[in-house]
Amino acid sequence: MYGPQPSVMDGNNAIGLALNMCLPLLWYLSSQEHGWLKRVLQIVFFLTIPAVMFTYSRGSMLALAILLLVMMLKSRHRIVMIFAALIGIILALPFIPEKWLERQQSILSYTEDGSAMSRLDNWKFCWRVAQDYPLTGAGFAFSSREMFEKYAPEFILKYNGKVWNTHNIFFSMLTSHGFPGLIAFVLMILFCMVSCVQLKWSVRHVPDLAWVKTYSEMIQLSLLAFIINGMFVNMEYFDLPYHWVSVTACLTVIVSRELARTNDSGSYVSTPLHAAAI
């Protein structure tokens, strides 16, 4: 399973991250819809799961497993969903290719896997570069042969002259933009998730704003997928996380205005906020 070319999602690891980030979007939006649109969103959600699996990306599979578990635990029907998931796994096992199972099991013996070890060695290279460029970073084109020859010549020798990318959003930001860039990147994600927590808390007693809680949960889980999956693929410039920051800012403004109206009038006046947010 590969993404469209040419695009930021053309690799199997990249499309795996993108699909994982969309899973909460599909599930939580389906909970807000009715009729045929609800069913379409649910069907696409369930079809996305095998699509992620057959990217053969181990990082995407790890993120998928954690994401689905968190979503089930957050559900009101968590026991039923966990039981159904276990049955589904048992029924699906005979149809899963042996190649896929071997690929996922290699996580347990990563020291014997060249791809996994190359990422660890690449992260060592990134750390060395960051120590020389702590404030500004080495720029967007840091992953060049010349840089590897200077900071990690053993990497080129070990991997037969190959130069690979970072496969980690945080190390990539650190090496490109230094420690200030990494801190800004991490704080952007952290503040967005904290804002979602605050939004859920602020609308807990306002029935007509209950949809804000759904949207906030959706954004939090999508960013969780980005963080976990991003530990194994360099998708730090993927659009969707930055869109979620914008959506969170919009939700904050909408909720603040509506709660202010409630406080001024003493009672809440219903408005088509769902459409306004979209």
Image (cartoon, helix red, strand yellow):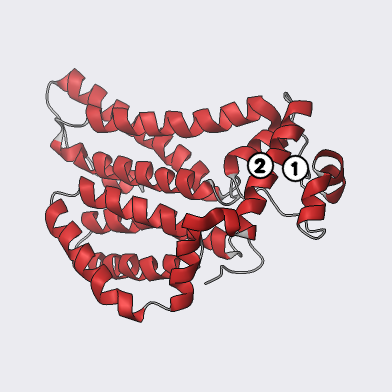
Q: Which residue position is annotated with label 1? A: 140
The answer to whether 106 is drawn above or below residue 176 in the figure is below
Instruction: Tell me residue 210's x, y (percent).
Output: 19, 40
Q: On the rendered structure, is 143 left or right of 71?
A: right
Secondary structure of the residue carrying tag 2 is helix
Q: Is residue 275 above or below residue 41?
A: above
Residue at 72% across / 54% down in the picture? 164
Q: Amino acid at mark 2?
A: Trp
Choose between 18 and 50: the one closer to the eye: 50
Residue at the image point whose x is 81% and y is 53% from the top: 156
**Residue in the image at 38% along x and 67% along y:** 48
Front label number (2 vs 1): 2
The spot of residue 261 in percent (x, y) is: 23, 25
- The residue most toward the bottom is 95
Q: Which mark is residue 23?
A: none
**Residue 123, quarter of picture:** top right
Label 2: how many residues lie within 10 Å, few (<14), some (14-19) or many (20+)? many
Is residue 264 depicted above or below 171 in this figure? above
Dot 1, how many residues are within 10 Å of its Cα: few (below 14), some (14-19), or many (20+)?
Answer: few
- Total labels drawn: 2
125 and 246: which is toward the camera = 125
Q: For the residues marked 2 and 1, what is the alpha-carbon distance in whole angstroms?
A: 16 Å
Left or right placement of residue 152 versus residue 122 in this view? right
Could you say where residue 115 lies in the image, as x and y percent from the top left? 63, 58
Comes first in the chain, label 2 or label 1? 2
Q: Amino acid at mark 1?
A: Phe
**Residue marked by disc 2:** 123
Residue 7 position, x and y percent, is: 63, 62
